[in-house]
Image (cartoon, grey):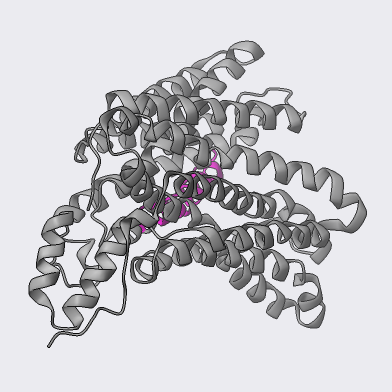
Amino acid sequence: MSTAPTFQFVESDVRPKDVRLATWICFFAWTFAVYDFVLFGNLLPKLAADLGWRAAQSTGINTWVTAGTALVAFAIGPIVDRIGRRKGILIAVAGAAVASLLTATVGWVVGIAAGLGIVFLVLVRSLAGLGYAEQAINAAYLNEMFAHSHSDPAKARRRGLIYSLVQSGWPVGSVLAAGSVYLLFPIGGWALCFAVAAIPAVFIIIAGRWLKESPQFGHRHQIDKMMKDGRVEEAQQLGKKYGIDVSEKASPLISVFRGESLRSTLTIGGAFLLNWLGVLSFSILGTSLLTAPDGKNVAFNNALLVLVISNATAFAGYLFHGWLGDRIGRRNAIGIGWILCAISFFTMLQAPNGNFPLIIGLYSAGLFFLIGPFSALLFFTGESFPVHTRATGSSIINASGQVGAIIGGLLITATLAAGAGWINATLWWGVIPILASGLLIFAARNVDPSKVRKD
């Protein structure tokens, strides 16, 4: 006599208002994860000055932090595919908050032992990789929630635009981080900035109590329970009903490198990695390129102007590519965007120095087509994997961006050290990788934006 399953999922429990609430929570969770993530970059020079670190030492520490971030962001995916999307979101939010709080105590640890303080900082900021992983978890979760609430073709064609609003938490979080530095740093220094960054997580975790697990994960979890209880025939019937491959029993970390998942892992992951070389060149190091005498030699000392241009451009780019992906397919929107990005930045590098309007106009266009496609890319990642590997695949691809940042940093540093200058460094390790990423993404499987993946 068969036993009742230990997990029951009732699909009608997930209502449209639950999906709307989940969308807002994901937006705020990502916004404040970015807030913490960007805050570290903004305050690293001040932190290094207070702790007596040399410039080279500070750069080395940041490289180790980036590597740790990638490792943590990679590791969370298989866990989320096991425990669920809802718990994954709460873990990511809590992890980013703990990282912020512990970062505020780095000064005390360094006071005890300088070497121990550096190791402590690297470990703590690696934990912040949970916050960076928030976008991958959001992509998996909302992809599945939208598949439940936007199943007809008319609604399905609005999913990308809605998700682009969630992903716009990046520019919003970046502006909040800059604002908090402006307001809080004069009062309590960098430690106060990090301590305050942990506060929003409390409210997000409280709101997370009302999050519902996604229907697709619920179905998969129920099938796995049935299989473990020996109710194979019932599990197969349920899998057939929801289009879930019951035969796939391997761990998500193994499954993501075989079958239909392998193509998505290699093509989207490779494109993501290559493109992050461009993100490092033109977004993260954009100010250095613009102001360097061997770059564009622009008198661009107003950091607020750079911030406004880059984040306003990113916000507009997110919405445009989210909208475009709903109409021509996300893969096509990403590829076209990145190819136009490469053209814009190449033209900017060739533009005569001293023409401020032309250089900034082309720089803004490049950022629009560089950052904007990420809103389509993350949602495209979610719809390119089955439920069994969705979070794992999304996390691997997301972590590959940090790997790209490390590779790009090493290549640009070596090129500059050889005396090639910023123009050549960003041409070779910015423009060309961006163009390659735009071409490579076309090797990924195309997904009809009007169709909803139920598995």
Location of residue 151 in the rendering, given as x and y in whole percent from the top left corner: 28, 39
Judged by its main secondary structure, the magenta piece is: helix
Residue occupying the point 50% across, 60% down = 89
Location of residue 147 in the rendering, given as x and y in whole percent from the top left corner: 31, 44
Of 158 and 442, which appears nearest the observer? 158
Residue occupying the point 61% across, 23% down = 296
Q: Image height check: is 343 above or below 105?
A: above
Of 64 and 203, which appears nearest the observer? 203
- Could one spot residue 378 in this view of the protein? yes
Residue occupying the point 34% across, 31% down = 155
Q: In which quarter of the image is residue 50?
A: bottom right
Q: Image height check: is 84 above or below 189?
A: below
Q: Is residue 155 left or right of residue 281?
A: left
> From which residue to which does the magenta span run?
396-419
Location of residue 331 in the rendering, given as x and y in whole percent from the top left corner: 28, 34
Q: Quadrant of residue 114?
A: bottom right
- Could one spot residue 63 in this view of the protein? no
